[in-house]
Amino acid sequence: MEKLFNTRSMIFTLYGDYISQYGNVIWIGSLIRLLKEFGHNEQSVRAAISRMSKQGWVQSEKQGNKSYYYLTDRGKKRMDEAANRIYQINPPSWDGEWRLLLYTIPEDKRHLRDELRRELVWSGFGLLSNSCWITPNPLEEQVNNLIAKYEIDSYVNFFRAKYEGMNQNKDLVDQCWDLEEVNERYSEFIQTYSQKYIIDKNKIEKGDLSDGSCFVERTMLVHQYRKFLFIDPSLPQELLPEDWLGDSAASLFRDYYQMLREPATRFFESVFEPGEPLDTKES
């Protein structure tokens, strides 16, 4: 079977959509079996989970002769943040204020600057000007976590402010994000998955879609929809264009997900092997 998507990325999807609901812990054998459904072999799974461990997303613990992997505190925070954005029903309301993050990280710490940029984009910040990032969302906690993580408090200033001109708030949005491109991606998602939804609904009603196939379809659905976390800043309704397709895509995602949820969960539970309670304190 052809391998579907990056192994590490698929592991993140499984942790976010399944494993996090079962104590955040999984036996490596179960993980290998689940990812086999997407064309990933044992070697690639072991290499990817090892890389995630070195990056601080997961930790391992031996129980007998078996290795179990669980999310670190950092991993749990990322999964929680992602879940809140993926499964939110209503867009956030806006208090009318912008959050501004400015930094002057020296050249000898350039790697921290590059990592911080990637984190800010993922959280939904937009680049207004050189080293000045803004968001209308209350991301104070995420900012404080980033400052503590990279130990850059002496290089960062953070503000809350109202925009007083010379244009409109939506003009700031146009400067920082390409919502037209994001909308095109949402349109592609709707076209693809509205058709798949109808096909799979008919198959399920006829009993022609196995639990394993539902598991694959649900995981792929989440995996594709999760990509919007990297390009959609989750702006409040007041700042979105009138023809915004994000809400329609979210509604389609929820309906499709709900249809696949029960059979996909049955398959996951048939493969998943829970371990003993782990001491998940990070060293």
Image (spheres, helix red, strand yellow):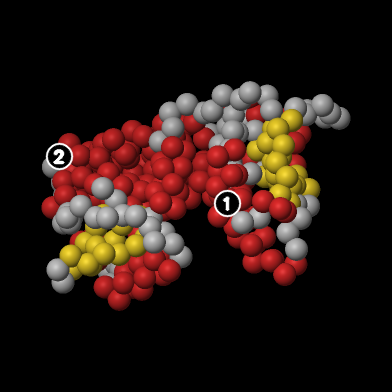
Q: In the rendered view, does 216 fall on the left or right side of 221?
A: left
Cα–Cα gap, marks 1 and 2: 54 Å
Identified by mark 2, the residue type is Lys
- Residue 273 appears in the rendering: yes
x and y percentages locating residue 141 in the rendered image: 55, 40
- Which residue is labeled 2 in the image? 206
The image's mark for residue 46 is none
What residue lies at 58% left-to-right and 38% top-to-bottom? Answer: 139
Q: Quadrant of residue 159?
A: top right
In this orientation, does residue 6 appear? no
Query: Which residue is painted at 56% across and 24% down in the image?
Result: 93
Characterize the local packing of mark 2: few (<14), some (14-19) or many (20 or more) Cα atoms within 10 angstroms. few
> Which quadrant of the structure image shows residue 117?
bottom right
Horizontal side of residue 17 vs 145, given as left or right: left
Of residue 138 and residue 263, the one placed in the foreground of this image is: 138
Of residues 214 and 279, which is closer to you in this image? 279
Give the mark nearest the N terminus, 1 or 2.
Answer: 1
Q: Are marks 1 and 2 in contact (CB under 8 Å)?
A: no
Residue 267 versus residue 66 in the image, above or below = above
Disc 1 crowd, CA 10 A, few/some/many (<14, 14-19, 20+): few
| Quadrant that contains the N terminus | bottom left
Q: Position of residue 14 (x, y in %)?
A: 32, 53
SS of the residue at dot 1? helix
How far across and down, in percent of the image, does residue 38 sit?
Answer: 29, 62
User: Disc 1 marks which amino acid?
Assistant: Ala
Q: Is residue 170 left or right of residue 14?
A: right
Disc assigned to residue 148: 1
Residue appearing at x 64%, y 66% in the figure: 111
